[in-house]
Image (tube, rainbow, N blue to C red):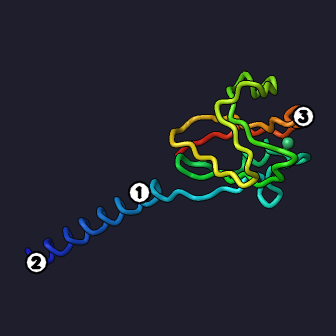
Amino acid sequence: MSSSQGSSSAVSRSLALLLCVLVLAQYAEAVTVNVGGTKGWTLGYNYKTWAATTRVKPWDSMFFKYDPRLHNVLVVSKADYDACRVNRPWATYKSGKDYVKFTKSGTYYLICGIAQHCQAGMKVAVNVRW
Ligand SMILES: [Cu+2]
């Protein structure tokens, strides 16, 4: 009787521990997300649909792949995103192989700062959350 109670509480403890590990693992697992999937960062792609169907967590790396002669990546405010204003970005990336990471939950706004690309739809609002 007492030995059977002992082993069942040992099983409970193991399950509780396993649950903790699984929960922590989900939080710790930062991944790389390819912005625009296989198309990358380019004109003529629907980033609204991409953002709505792609999960991005804090600490994940968003990978922007593009020809640096044609495009860049600016992190901007919502107002500048809405207006496609390119002259006061919070951050600028221009290597063509850029990893952009946000460590806090929130909505982040990224646009291309070249010519009229943002107006043409080369802009993405990413809801970063757990
Ligand atoms: Cu561009």
Q: Nearer the viewer, residue 7 or 96?
A: 96
In the drawing, what numbered circle is on residue 92? Answer: none
> Mark 2: which amino acid?
Ser
Q: How many marks?
A: 3
Where is residue 71 shown, x and y percent of the image? 83, 44
Residue occupying image coordinates x 75% and y 28%: 81
Q: Is mark 2 within 8 Å of ligand 1?
A: no
Between circles 1 and 2, the one closer to the viewer is 1
In terms of secondary structure, where does tag 3 sit?
A: loop
79 over 121 or under it: above or below: above
Q: Quadrant of residue 84?
A: top right
- Quadrant for the N terminus in the image: bottom left
Q: Nearer the viewer, residue 125 or 97?
A: 97
Give the residue at mark 1: 23
Give the residue at mark 3: 115
124 over 65 or under it: above or below: above
Instruction: Work out how far the residue at label 2 is from the one at label 3, CA to CA, in angstroms.
Output: 75 Å
Residue occupying image coordinates x 68% and y 26%: 77
> Mark 1: which amino acid?
Val
Question: In the picture provided, is 99 more to the left or to the right than 1?
Answer: right
Where is residue 22 shown, x and y percent of the image? 41, 62
Question: In the picture provided, is 19 more to the left or to the right than 130?
Answer: left
Earlier in the chain: of badge 1 and badge 3, it is: 1
